Amino acid sequence: MRLRTLIAATTTTLFAAAPVAAQDHSDWPENFTLGTASQGGTYFAYGSGWANFVSENLDISGGAEITGGPMQNMALVQTGDVKFGLTTMGPARASRQGNSPLAPGMKMENVCAMFPMYQTPFSVTALADSGIESIDDIPDGAKIGFGPAGSTSDTYFPKMMETLGVDFERQNGSWSDLGTQLQDGLIDVVAFAAGIPVPAISQLEVQTGVNIISFTDEERQKVTNKFPVSEFTIPKDTYQSLESGSEVVSMWNFSIANCDVPDSLVYEMTKLTMENNDRMVSIHKAAQSTIPENVDKNTALPWHPGAARWFRENGYEIPDSRIQ
């Protein structure tokens, strides 16, 4: 039922893993699984690399699982089908309040935050020869790909488009599949919500010309007034197609864990991630924001005690009331 990409742990240990191995791991699971999203998106690339990094250093086998993205990851972590996952603050808040479309009425209160990841920009991409250079240029009835069903993009981007007066036909699929459909002319636009650079966009740029479309100031104001997002600029050097920064909106991502996962394991995972940003950036450039200074961007979830311990030991304030 679940498609899993297992990433075998290697015998190589990096970054002084030996002291970790000397600790008592009797309550640790034999292995772990991380819920990510579809292939061709940032969650899968970031999550697969992170799981491998943890496996190499903490002497525990781990792997990344392809899922429907942040909303489904909240449900999978809540039920314990996977112990770890990646999510965004919007789906996290909705899920805790019992407003997940995947499990209406279920308050997902056994999901805890581990560490900040990066911001997810909401950006629109069309082929360069389509004539679509702005949101206003999207024709009535356009076929727009919004990513996997239940993903952050699929949850929020259609409502944003409606707010901006766009008439469209909704399409779902993995980011890589939607990129192929865009290139083949089967859809008109892809509305991406993923960490940058989005692998599917980078691949498209190699094969064809694309327009990465900015929001106008008025459009950004309308969207930020109505949805849990903030203004964001995609840097010019993110994609070769950009001649200047692209003005969009974004939402924060956090790693999550089932709150019953042993504190010592979450502590070591958080410590490894927060103390080795260069290694995280080598996994994915979006991890430039995977730093402890962004601890305050968690506005929706309680903190896992193991993660909170590391942040507090390193001078970052987390009130007792925010710890599960």
Image (cartoon, rainbow, N blue to C red):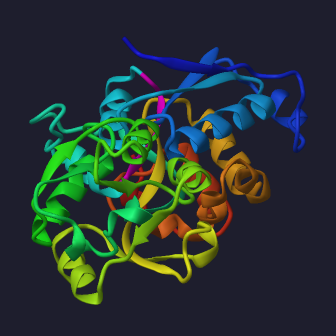
Q: Quadrant of residue 104?
A: top left
Is 182 inside the magenta-drawn segment?
no
Work out whether residue 99 or residue 130 is closer to the camera in this orientation and state it: 130
Q: Quadrant of residue 219?
A: bottom left
- Vertical side of 69 occupied by 232: above or below: below
Quadrant housing the N terminus: top left
Which residue is rendered at x = 88% and y = 32% of the image?
Answer: 13
- Vertical side of 241 occupied by 66: above or below: above
Q: Quadrant of residue 9?
A: top right
Work out whether residue 255 or residue 107 is closer to the camera in this orientation and state it: 255
Which residue is rendered at x = 77% and y = 54% of the image?
Answer: 276
Give the percent coordinates (x, y) of residue 181. Answer: 37, 40
Q: Which residue lies furthest to the top in this view?
A: 1
- Vertical side of 244 occupied by 5: above or below: above
Work out whether residue 93 or residue 310 is closer to the camera in this orientation and state it: 93
Q: Is the magenta stretch mostly helix, strand or loop?
A: strand
Work out whether residue 277 or residue 312 is closer to the camera in this orientation and state it: 277
Which residue is rendered at x = 56% and y = 69% of the image?
Answer: 241
Q: Indicate left or right for 152 with 212 as reference.
A: left
Q: Indicate left or right for 209 with 162 as reference.
A: right
Q: Indicate left or right for 217 with 57 as reference.
A: left
Give the percent coordinates (x, y) of residue 196. Answer: 54, 60
Residue 156 in view, yes or no: yes
- Magenta residue span: 82-88
Residue 92 in view, yes or no: no
Q: Which residue lies furthest to the bottom in this view?
A: 217
